[in-house]
Image (cartoon, helix red, strand yellow):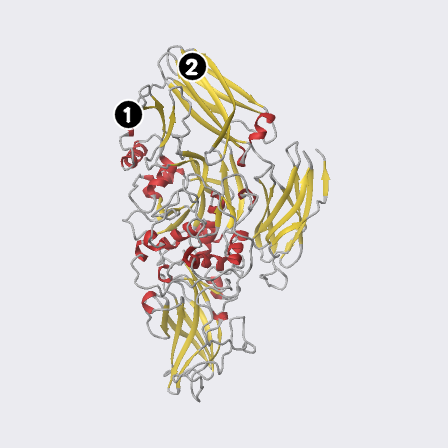
Amino acid sequence: MDSPRSDVGRWGGNSWQPTATPSPEPEPEPEPGRRSRRSGRSFWARCCGCCSCRNADDDWGPEPRDNRSSRGRGSSAGASTGARRPGSRGSGVNASRGSGVNAAGDGTIREGMLVVIGVDMLSSRSDRNRQEHHTDEFEYEELILRRGQPFCVVLFLSRPYESSDRITLELLIGNNPEVGKGTRVIIPVGKGGSGGWKAQVTKADGQTLNLRVHTSPNSIIGKFQFTVRTHSDAGEFQLPFDPHNEIYILFNPWCPEDIVYVDHEDWRQEYVLNESGRIYYGTEAQIGERTWNYGQFDHGVLDACLYILDRRGMPYGGRGDPVSVSRVISAMVNSLDDNGVLIGNWSGDYSRGTNPSAWVGSVEILLSYLRTGYSVPYGQCWVFAGVTTTVLRCLGLATRTVTNFNSAHDTDTSLTMDIYFDENMKPLEHLNHDSVWNFHVWNDCWMKRPDLPSGFNGWQVVDATPQETSSGIFCCGPCSVESIKNGLVYMKYDTPFIFAEVNSDKVYWQRQDDGSFKIVYVEEKAIGTLIVTKAIGSNMREDITHLYKHPEGSEAERKAVETAAAHGSKPNVYATRDSAEDVAVQVEAQDAVTGQDLTVCVVLTNRSSSRRTVKLHLYLSVTFYTGITGSVFKEDKKEVVLAPGASERVVMPVAYREYQPHLVDQGAMLLNISGHVKENGQVLAKQHTFRLRTPDLSLTLLGAAVVGQECEVQIVFKNPLPVTLTNVVFRLEGSGLQRPKVLNVGDIGGNETVTLRQTFVPVRPGPRQLIASLDSPQLSQVHGVIQVDVAPASGGRVFSDAGGDSHSGETIPMASRGGA
């Protein structure tokens, strides 16, 4: 397998460097089953057919500038920012008298010209524009709009507006804006515009002019510059570009004409506006859950999302298409190919970065990427998915985080999970390239698919975890869930790979005496056994398996699997099946806890009317959640005699001292079961994964939470292990409550209880989630969350960018310690 690349993306040959001087970028660790392949064509030629035929490069995003918080075209040469207009409302009102240009271009303001001396964009969070566009939670003072929806603007003029005056609004984005590409939008006031853009006068009162501007439902998303041109008998005037007047335009799931439209308000509240959510992990029998802070409205996050598109070099003209945008995001959230947001690491060694289990949200990751331009170490699937949810929700796409339990990774496009054994049913690891992840986390986003035949609108899978390449790029999706359900693997994008993740069969092959292989068992219900997401409006878990697959064993489900397999590399696999299944194998799930002894129990059932003798082999090893296993540390062999219709339990005890030296991330273990029925030759083969539970952090709010007032939280943790936890790090984060904060607390003794107290200052009212995590080399995957109901400030001010700066490496003494 080729080692992952660490290229520098679109601007590899340019001299641009981040403003800060960060530490050298950690090299990506080898990732499971990754292949790094790259053709000589550009990303857009390989990834997006609609962008591969461009003739010019002039609307491509600018190379990153030193000030990454300013997206779009930036300040034009010679543009000036006038003083604030005295007595005007809000930060969006700016005076620019004497700074405009006339028709002669000499800057002279002639008597009788219609000069725009100020503009009120009505951009504050309390103004109607932000309220009506559902963007009032963004911690920004600029105007943020959703496309396809009107907004209001107020012009302050040098004289009263007359019927003979002509006013034109312009929005521009990109280095060389062009009307034909949608990067330059010209809107004549009082006349019909093009593509859904238009503007009307709603009120003319002396030297004040109120306008209502309609935006196109197909508009490019991004940060636009805004200007006003006037024409009168005395000449023409143009308002200078002013950063305070820049406009962010996003996708609009509230607009029926937008292809991302969602026809359920509760869906929009959950999948667009909710700033936190639940991510599920573990195994189907032992589901764990953690709260994730998406933080899509935190200050700086929107700029980070647009910077991702810039960094990829996505043409501005293509940024109105959610199919293309979501596909780019799936490529850019991982670092392969393009130095994207997150470096994947499944090695277990996170000494050069952050353990993926320690993250509590996306904000710290995205702001670090925006600030430094370097990929952030480290991520695994739930981190990639959490960040993708943040980015897509921030840009206006209804998005949810989805977990698939027993998720297959098909490496040979056979659309089956193939496991090879020798003549004695010992695994042939050098042939077992396919793997089954205990769980895998990806995203669903909602949109129409005009690039596909009818019937494939709705939920689309996007997966930013870099597993296999798609058109030479580590990206995946968007792929219609409907095409996955019906095995239509020829539909774009990446349907074969995703279908295999949720609905392939696990096929056991045994080597024969002549060296050939024979199918000895097909496990039809082993893959995609449960697919879940957070329920709408609650923290309950919602089973969405039925959206991805027909009922297991149904005629429709079998047809979907065999239709898909017919398009794979082993189309005749089902013709070689041979089975006799008198004896059934089942594993009883145990509630195992990290630091304690455990018991593994296998139940054999004889479903025949005759006696059966089973030679049973049990092999126990630790496993990463990706299906990569360590060496066997305990095994047992038994012969079991089963009377007709009888069941027998086979028990294998496992002490803490036996498994502790072998533990890896997630505390997961794999039980391999193989056996042989003496009387009929039946081969038994089953794999069972279980995990060791970790403790939770206990969070308690000490006092009422009010915007702008200091509040205190108490965190309590008890070490469940008899060994000392070293270099313990806590993380604390919550949108509207606390910017990402890192606390170094040193060592925690075996079975010791510790208590921390931390203060924070809420910046936005309403129900909020404060999330904490603990990480150390000896123990990870420890989390806690508390809901904080924040009351508004008495003065009514609800936003300040002082919501606690992002802290890193702060050393915090423990308030108290206690023994077991």
- SS at circle 2: strand
Mark 2–mark 1 distance (CA, rounded to whole Å): 25 Å
In the image, what residue type sits under mark 1?
Thr
Work out whether residue 740 or residue 89 is closer to the camera in this orientation and state it. Answer: 740
- The N terminus sits in image quarter: top left
Measuring from the top left, give residue 798's x and y in whole percent: 58, 61
Left or right of 451, for residue 686: right
Q: Which residue is mark 1?
A: 576
Q: Residue at x 60, y 47 (%)?
A: 731
Q: Nearer the viewer, residue 50 or 548?
A: 50
Q: Is residue 654 left or right of residue 160?
A: right
* Horizontal and vertical percent position of residue 120: 49, 73
Quick check: 265 above or below 189?
Answer: above
| Residue 103 shown left or right of residue 761 in the figure | left
Q: Quadrant of the C terminus?
A: top right
**In the displayed structure, would residue 184 be above or below residue 454?**
below
At label 2, the amino acid type is Val
Residue located beneath label 2 in the image: 614
Determine contact: label 2, label 1, CB under 8 Å.
no
Give the mark, 2 or 1, whose residue is nearer the N terminus.
1
Q: What is the x, y in percent for residue 800?
A: 59, 62
From the viewer's perspective, is residue 245 above or below residue 4?
Answer: below
Residue sitting nearer the eye, 265 or 661: 661
- Where residue 534 sits in the image (x, y, percent)? 48, 43
Decide which of 510, 651 is in the foreground and name it.
Answer: 510
